[in-house]
Image (cartoon, rainbow, N blue to C red):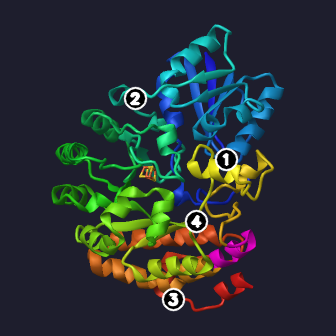
Amino acid sequence: MKKLLLINPRNYLKSGLLNYEFSNFPPLGLGILATLTPDNWEIEIFDENFDDFQFIEADFVGFTAFTGNAYRAYQIADIYRKKGIPTIMGGIHVSMIPEEAEKFIDTVVTGEAESIWPTVINDFEHNRLQKRYTGIRLKAHQLVPARHDLFHRRYSVDTIQTTRGCPWRCEFCTVHAFNGTVYRQRPVDDVLDELEKTTKPLLFFVDDNLIGYSKRSMQRTIELLKGMKKRGIKKEWFTQASINFSENDEMLQLAHETGCRMVLIGVESEKIESLKETKKDLNQKIGIQNYSNIFKKIHSYGIAVLGTFIFGLDTDSKQDIQNRADFIINSNVDAFQTTVLTPFPGTGTYYKFLRENRIHYTNFPESWQRFRFFENVIEPAKMTHEELTEELFTAWSRIYDPKNLIKKFKMTLTETRDVKTAFLSLITNANYANTIFEGTGYYFDPENMMKTVPHGGVFDKINT
Ligand code: SF4
């Protein structure tokens, strides 16, 4: 029996968004490839999120990676290549710049890999592995469930993907480049069957937008949630959706009844010029002045809003950075992911910054390790690189000030009238705070925080 080893590499700097167990999610793509691998193969998923790498014998070694952990994948691949063991890699990063990956990996798969994986395995078995394969986008009903049983047992969250693709073309986003602009929804029964195989009490629908972009797609979400109810699938779940998540009361009610606790919504900015710059068209259409009522309505169903915000946009002055912090602090958004504009390969932002020679770190592939959302890797338009870093720390210190996080916890509790939702929101903020201030000595422990609210000190230290 041949052995296929699938490796989920970890950012070598061991920091960034994926550094905390709570924000680590199983490598779904590897689980899907495992499903598509014939029974005459033994399969192991080695996950650096939990275990330090050690050499494991295998006949064929596969990797998936985002930009932030691509370098680590190349490093591990080198160990196997030196022993003559063939390596293969797919995922968003190598799909966008396969020429780079080909220097470090024997075989590169671009695009969605499942369409081509059976061919890859067959070619391996017949000793005719190619240098490059190109996956095509399958129809939604052709997508297969992941082998959840192979994921590391320490993951506290199950993940499932019910849709792919997005018709919008936000400048900073890789989704439309990788998964395409056609929104594809898996058949409800396929999703429910996969859901029944998950075992954790927490679930993350990793869809970039669970509800879709039309009345029909919203109806399909309603059918999915009705199906969960009918089959008795009750989980604490969270997801991602566009700002029109609040539009359908029936969907909100079903989301509440099936255990939805939080929805991530791409707010990005409170400034219309920034929304124009990023081509965040839906948010412009809905209108910033309506955010507060939208969030309130979502709260009324016991669901918290995790808003994502981007700092360092070309339209951002120093004052705009602090204004965005003010908006976050004063608005009724519950949890906040506050990242720096990062030019990920494949995005419009990347090509623009490359063209204008405004990427600060360019020692690739090593520098990709810095592309992890919370490190400033750009030369912004309206200030220097160093000034942006300084402004970011001032803004972050204000946003994630423990007093503000406690204030937000109370707000979430009041508006959602749900202790679990309020705690999930607080823990989410604590994770972001700990990620951002890693290495500074700051540590936010939500449970202890509820007993004693610490005062001052730590943020002053960060700023000096
Ligand atoms: S940010 Fe969201 S809405 Fe914009 S392209 Fe990406 S997935 Fe679509």
The residue located at (28%, 78%) in the rendering is: 415
Crowdedness near tag 4: few (<14), some (14–19) or many (≥20) residues, C-alpha within 10 Å:
many
Q: Are marks 4 and 3 in contact (CB under 8 Å)?
A: no
| CB of mark 1 near ligand 1 (< 8 Å) | no
> Which residue, given by chain and number where applicable, does mark 2 sit on?
144
Q: Earlier in the sequence, mark 1 or mark 3?
A: 1
Q: Is residue 385 part of the magenta span, yes or no?
A: yes
Crowdedness near tag 1: few (<14), some (14–19) or many (≥20) residues, C-alpha within 10 Å:
many
- Foreground disc of the pair 1, 3: 1
Given residues 351 and 63, the one toward you in this image is 351
Q: Classify mark 3: helix, strand or loop.
A: loop
Residue 291's disc number: none
- State the CA–CA distance, disc 2 to disc 3: 47 Å
Q: Classify mark 1: helix, strand or loop.
A: loop
For the residue marked with disc 1, what is the amino acid? Asn
Crowdedness near tag 3: few (<14), some (14–19) or many (≥20) residues, C-alpha within 10 Å:
few
For the residue marked with disc 2, what is the amino acid? Val
> Which residue, given by chain and number where applicable, does mark 4 sit on?
313
- State the CA–CA distance, disc 4 to disc 3: 34 Å
* Quadrant of image for the N terminus: top right
> Is 113 drawn above or below residue 348 in the view shown?
above
| Residue 145 screen position, x and y as percent | 40, 32
Specify the segment rendered in magenta.
383-393
Residue 69's disc number: 1
> Which residue, given by chain and number where applicable, does mark 3 sit on?
453
- Foreground disc of the pair 4, 1: 4
